[in-house]
Each structure stands twice: as C-alpha cells, then as structure tokens.
Amino acid sequence: MSSDDDGAIDALRDATRKLADDRYGDLTDPRQVDERAAQAGDVEYLLARVRYLEADRDRALTDVRWLSPDIPVAPRDAVVRIRAICKIFPDLFSAVFVVLATHQRVPRKALAAAVKAFRSDTSALSDADVAGLLAGLWNSGREGFESILRTRKGHRSKAGALAWVKTDE
C-alpha cells in the first residue's frame, strides 16, 4: 500500500466528514449520521461513506506493514483485520490460527473477545473458552486446539471410530 493510496483514503475520509458536518452537524456518532442520511435519502453522503468504508477495508486487507513485530497495534485496526479474517476462513481452526499468528502482540483475552464477536460457531463458548482455544493452539497446535474444543460445554463431539456407536445428539 503506497502513501498515495493512504492519501486518497484520507481524502475520502475528510470529504465524508465534511458532508456529515455540513448536513448532520448535531450528530457525532457515525452510525447515527448514517441512519439519518438513510432516512433523508441523502444518496450523496451515503455513496461517499460507502466509498470511504470500502477503501478503508481494502487497505486493511492489502496492507501488510502491520505484520511487523515493531509496529504497535491500534485496537481499531486489529478489530477490522480480525473481522476480515473471521469472514475469509470458513472453519474455526483456520480462523483462530490466522488471528493468533497475525496478532501475537495483542493480549489473548482481547483476541478471544474479537474472535467470539465475529464467529457464530463460538456462541456456545465463553470468552475464557475461546482464550483456552488460543492457548491450546499456541502451545500444542491442532491437537491442543481440538482437545480444548472437545472439553468445552456445548461442543458436539466427533463420531467415534466405531460406526455403530452413536454420539449424544
């Protein structure tokens, strides 16, 4: 990602903020501004907002400078990337693996909360359970991850090696 791209994204952000301030100056929360613009049918603002959000998302998906261990992690940026990772990877193991590998400087509790927020297959697990999955993966790889997942309440166990043995359903 070049500095020209960053400049273009900053220009989109500034233009969107100017439109919001000019038309909805009484509102400070972007969600409220978006809602009011949608109610008013303000297509110009909504298109500007969508262009900015898409450009910002694309930057988050293509910019790899953040992988450097010397770069501090901004919570907002980490959340955007974790959300994207959780959408891209269909299975829980892959998503957790990539999140853990790419966000080693982020505290495990924060990673667990983010993964839980963006993965529907973790709804039966507590934040501590998801943190346990991260620890199991970090310490023992897939075997540790699967072991932790099997022991957590509400997780459906895999069928046994004996086909005639039924699992609890």
Image: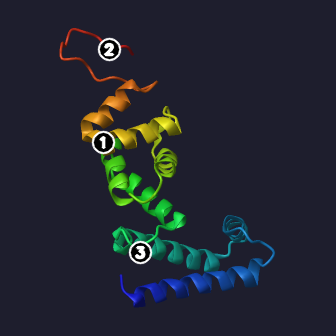
Identified at 50% across, 47% down, the residue is 109
Q: CA distance from mark 3 to mark 2?
A: 45 Å
Say few, some or many: other residues with alpha carbon within 10 Å of mark 1 (under 14 / 14 to 19 / 20 or more).
few
Quadrant of image for the C terminus: top left
Between discs 1 and 2, the one toward the N terminus: 1
Which residue does the numbered mark 2 point to in the structure image? 167
In the picture provided, is 89 more to the left or to the right than 19? Answer: left
Quarter occupied by residue 12: bottom right
What residue lies at 73% left-to-right and 71% top-to-bottom? 40
Q: Residues within 10 Å of mark 3 (few under 14, many from 20)?
A: some
Residue 91 x, y percent position in the rendering = 32, 43
Res. 135 image quadrant: top left
Name the amino acid type tagged 2: Thr
Residue appearing at x 73%, y 68% in the figure = 36
Q: How many marks?
A: 3
Which label sits in the foreground, 1 or 3? 1
Q: Is residue 66 above or below residue 89?
A: below
Give the mark toward the camera: 1 or 2.
1
- Label 3: which secondary element: helix
Q: Is 22 or 123 nearer to us in this picture? A: 123
**Classed neighbour count for the residue bearing mark 2: other residues with Cα under 10 Å, few (<14), some (14–19), many (≥20):** few
The residue that mark 3 highlights is: 59
Q: CA distance from mark 1 to mark 2?
A: 29 Å
User: Which numbered tag is attached to residue 139?
Assistant: 1
93 or 34: nearer the viewer: 93
Q: Earlier in the sequence, mark 3 or mark 2?
A: 3
Mark 1 or 3, nearer chain start: 3
Which residue occupies 42% across, 70% down? 60
Instruction: Classify mark 1: helix, strand or loop.
Output: helix
Name the spot of residue 10 as percent of width and height, x first: 53, 85
Q: Is residue 39 above or below residue 156?
A: below
Q: Residue 92: where, in percent of width, then height?
A: 35, 42
